[in-house]
Each structure stands twice: as C-alpha cells, then as structure tokens.
Image (tube, rainbow, N blue to C red):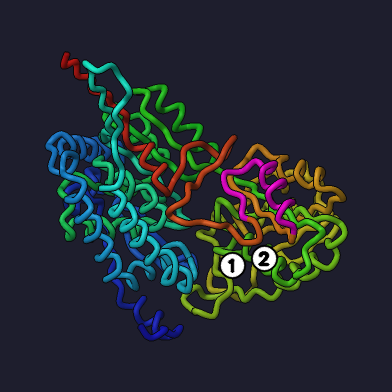
Amino acid sequence: MTERTHDDWLALAAKIEPATTAWIGGPVPSLSGATRTTVNPATGAVLAEVTECDEHDVDAAVAAARRAFEGGAWSTASPRDRAAVLHRIARKIEDHVEELALLDSLDAGKRIADTIAIDAPGSAAILRWYAESLDKVYGEVAPTGGADLAVVTREPLGVVAAVVPWNYPLEMAIWKIAPALAAGNSVILKPAEDSPLSALRLAVLAAEAGLPDGVLSVMPGAGPVVGRALGRHPGVDVVTFTGSTSTGQLFQQYAGQSNLKQVWLEAGGKSAVVVLDDVADLDAVADGVAAGIFTNTGQVCSATSRLVVQRGVAGELVQRVIGRALAIDVGDPLDPATGMGPVVSERQAARVLELMEAGAAEAREVHGGGLVPDMPAPTYVRPQVLLGVDPDAPIAQTEVFGPVLSVHVVDTVDEAVAVANGTPYALAAGLWTDSLSRAHGVARRLRAGTVSVNCVDALDVATPFGGFGQSGYGRDLSLHALDKFTGLKTTWIHHG
C-alpha cells in the first residue's frame, strides 16, 4: 500500500460515514430515542449523533446474549468452527483497516500514524492469534483410581460485559472480545462515551463475517448508566473492565450487590522507568524515556510517567529528555508527520492542565506544559517535564493520563527500587541498564505486572498484561486471558 499523505487522510475523513446505532442482532435505536453527540477532539467538529442506551436497552442486550448462549450456535460450536469465524472477522478488519484507523483517529484524536500501523492491524492479529489457539488448548485427566475417570474441561461462562476505555478504542475492545468469543461466550461491549464509533463498525463487520445474532452486542452510553446496569445485571456472568481504579471499585460493588459475577480489572497506573548509572548510550535511553510517556499524548495506562534515575547519569540524561519533549511536534493527528495529537476531549484537557499547574507548583524546575496556542480546539497540550519533585508529592502519585513526566534523582539501587515501588499501583515498569546481572536482580524487585528492560512498554499478544494492587487483577492477552472467560468443570465417571 502506498503511504498516504496528510491530504489523503483529510480527503478520506471527509467521506467517512460512521455507524451510529447500538447493535443487538442488528442496528437498533435506543428505546428512549436518546442520542449523544460525539466530537472530533482535534477540531471540535461534530462527527455524529450516536445512540445513547440506558438500562432498558441493557436488558434487551442481556436477553439477546442469553438466548444466543443457551441456543448453542456459538457456545457449543466446535473450536474449529469458532476459529473460522474469528478469522473472517480479522479479515474484515484487514479489508477495512483504513476506515477503522480513521474512526479511532477522528473519534479519539489518535495519530493516524499509530492507528493505521498499530491499532487496526494489531486488532486483526489478536483475533487471528486466539483463533489459532482454540484447537491447541486441552482439558485435563486427573489421576484417579483404576475404576474412575475424572475429566477436567473448560466451559464458557455465559454473558460477558466488556467495558473499555477511550485511549485505544478498537484495540482494547479486541483485547476483551477475542478471548471471550474464542471461549464460546456471548459478549456485550460498552465502548467509552468519547469513542464509540469503531466499536459500532466492528459489530457490523462481525455480523457480516458470520457471527451469530446476539453473540456480540454493542451498547454506547454513559458509564454511570450503561456501565452500572451491566455491572448490576443478574444476567451478566462476567465483567471485564479497563479504566480508572475508582470505576473498577464500583464494579466490585455492583457484583456484590447483584449476583457475585466475576469482575476482572485492568485499572490505573503510575509506572516508573528506572535508569541505572551503568548505561552508556544515553541517547537511546532518552528516546525510550520520551516514548514511554509521550506516546499517545500520555494517554496510556502503562505510561512510564516517573523517571527514577541514578545521580551519575541524571544530568546528561534529563537534559536529553527535556530536549526531546520540547521538540515534539504537537498537531493534527491526521498528519503522518505529527509527533503528538490532542487529548481525547476538552474535559480531559482541562483535567490535564489542572494537574500540570499543580505539578509545576510542586517542582523545583518546570519545562513545557500548558495549552498549545492557535490550535483549532483547546485539546492540544504541550509535553511537560518536572524536576525536583518529591516522590510522595501528588503529581508523583496521581495518574494524569497526559504527557507529564516527573523526574526523581536517586543515589543507590535500593533507593531507586523504593521510589519505583512507592505508589499504590503496580501495572508496569521500565529498567535501563547495561548489566545483565543487575537487569535480572532489579527487575525481580520491581513490583509490576510487566517490566520492560532496555525497551519501552514491551507488549505482545503471547504475553499476559495486567498488574497488582490498585492496578487491578486478571490478565489480558496470552492464553491466560482465557482463564477469565472459562470455568473449570470436573466430570467424574465411576466405571468399575
């Protein structure tokens, strides 16, 4: 494919006609007739009026999902038959990769350079991975006496509610949907209010690929309404959620108030990147530190928003990081040359700016930050680097979800580990060192679900992703994700 220019993407965006209605076995308006305006954060222009669901629409979606599950067309289909459908959905994504990339860029302000190279094709690849895994996951035969046979099988759990955030709209949906569908469940997807368009299009493509009616529904709407209704619904068996810790705690409450449904949480993060004083290539490290926080405008749950660096290399490294931060070209996300786009909404921009101002008051030295002037919408913020921040200061403990880096200079490895582990979160961590023994030793001491050594936010569908503490529990990606969507069943046969 020829690489498209800024003008190419603008022309394609002008022609796009997004799907706007909820999906329950087909496009359906909300029972109330309500809609919500979705806005392009890069321009402030209205993109579409999207169906606004409520608890009554959730009842309809749950009923359809339950009928589909108990009907067995999907839940009892052979692994190979389910795999064939998942492969066809992946092919649909590949065939519509530019459209899906554009929808996420327009809806969430994401750089088209990322959505066309990573998010959309990556979503298809994840579906294919789970499709290929299905006939390679086996049950067990337990050791019993000679007159008995005990077989342990994995059974789909039923109706899964997947509640996803706005920072990676399509890809986060696929992280949840792919293993849940692969296991034979019915799924109700609730996209974020700010970014529903790619999820609605995905529902259409899945149906075209042959996914039976009711197996995948999409419910756009407000979190406190649709999310709450799904969390409290007695017909929902599992909730899988990515988002803030506070919302994750609500889902735990909803489960206790209803049917004790399983709740799996990938929640907040305040990850640290630790740089030891034996590193020689400070340019490579500076590139990694900058990418770790400024990618996707800092709107990444595993963003390494705290730099913990030993004093011996701190001076030179920090100046390199500041230089890279201030050189980032903040601009139109549809321009492939743009280094960083807007945040997802004016509301999120206001929150980031408030935290930037508070962080500046807590720092000894401030570089960057604030709104970028003369932009088409007040959603473009400058990267900010804060020096001389106390590790216990609010800005070093609060998940900003924006391009804000706090710098913490330490003397010893022990101090570096203590600072890195010194938040309630434990989703990810980074480590830069030229010593293999130090890499092993320090990585073991960092409390995080993933430690990326001499690389940035290491991730692959074959490896589990998730955290500890207030970052939640359970794992996305890898075969371990199937654990969330299946239950172990023992069938004991006495034949003696």
| Residue closest to the eye, 387 or 313 | 313
* Residue 13 lies in the magenta stretch: no
Could you tell me which secondary element the residue under label 1 belongs to? loop
- Left/right placement of residue 170 relative to residue 379 reads left
The answer to which image quadrant residue 431 occupies is: bottom right
For residue 419, say whether it is visible: yes
Q: Which residue is mark 2?
A: 290
Give the residue type at disc 2: Ala
Q: Which residue is mark 1?
A: 380
Tell me which residue sits at (55%, 51%) in the image.
301
Q: Secondary structure at mark 2?
A: helix
Label 2 near label 1: C-beta < 8 Å? no
Asked if the magenta segment contains residue 441, the reply would be yes
Give the spatial CA distance, label 1 vs label 2: 18 Å
Please report the bounds of the magenta region as a residue range: 435-452
Q: Quadrant of the N terminus?
A: bottom left
Dot 1 or dot 2: first in sequence order is: 2
**Nearer to us in this view, 188 or 120:** 120
Displayed quadrant of residue 93: bottom left
Residue 168: % across, % down: 45, 57
**Which residue is depicted at the point 34% across and 79% down?**
12
Residue 59's spot in the image, x, y percent?
A: 24, 35
Please tell me in which quadrant of the rendered image residue 155 appears. top left
Q: Position of residue 322 (x, y in %)?
A: 76, 68
